[in-house]
Amino acid sequence: MPPRQGEGSGVPLRCWLSLPADRPPRAGVLVLPEVFGINAWVRSVADRLASAGYAALAVPLFARTAPELELGYDEASLQLGRSHKERTEAVTLLADVEQAAEWLAERIADPVAPLGCVGFCFGGHVAMLAATLPGIAATCDFYGAGVAGARPGGGAPTLSELSRIQGRLYCFCGEADPLIREGDVRAIEGALAAAAEPERHRLIRVPGAGHGYLCEARRDFHPEGAAQGWRTMLALFEEVLGR
């Protein structure tokens, strides 16, 4: 479907909505992109979730500085995307995601229905923040770098927010990811274990996988890890959101 307009903290959100072709959506899922914006791969993620029965809404994370950003995976694009990332703040990111969540819940005609959330790279980092919102029941953070030591705009690391998450959170990272070092992985693992009863939160490590391993357009694409990631994500959404 064409991009849709929403409102988040007074800033228009140019989102991408994908709906199941032949049935009402079973639930809604927010899709939070990498620093490359809502590009063809992110739209394909939303479309694939729609084929699994979900209303999937890809939400821009740079609505204030680059509302229509759509980049490839070359070095120049990476540097441009990172320049916009450095201008974000947790409070405005959360406001935009919350407004998108409210819009999506209304779109599926169930304002109190639990929603899922999935994010990749910077979007994975923001997904951990978004998991603190009351309507988000299941979150998948794929290789969300920086959560152990930073927060967009400054402040306590995003990892410190885990105690506020009421739903389920799965964190995925490749064991060969240079952006998530072993010390960060240990910090994430320990925080997940301390923040919830066993199995409510999980860390999934993928041997041999680097950063961005779920994306077919990136050189670190890892077919086995990607397939496992999709299976695990859909199983979580089925368990928590399925109806």
Image (tube, helix red, strand yellow):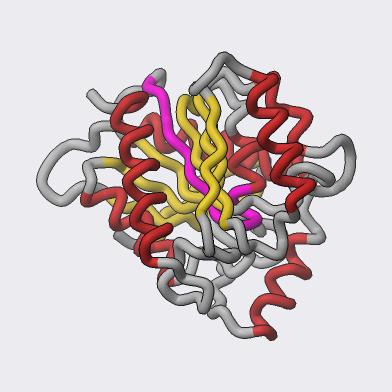
Where is residue 154? Give x, y as percent: 88, 45
Quadrant of the image occupied by residue 111 = top left
Closer to the camera in the image, 123 or 175: 175
The vertical placement of 231 against 4, above or below, is above
- Which residue occupies 51% across, 78% down? 219
Closer to the camera in the image, 27 or 102: 27
Quadrant of the image occupied by residue 108 = top left
Q: Is residue 121 magenta?
A: yes
- Which residue occupies 32% across, 36% down? 235
The boundaries of the magenta stretch are 113-124
Q: Is residue 165 left or right of residue 41?
A: right
- Quadrant of the drawing holding the C terminus: top left
Where is residue 96? Give x, y as percent: 62, 42
- Which residue occupies 64% across, 24% down? 193
Q: Is residue 185 magenta?
A: no
- Most extreme residue toward the left is 22
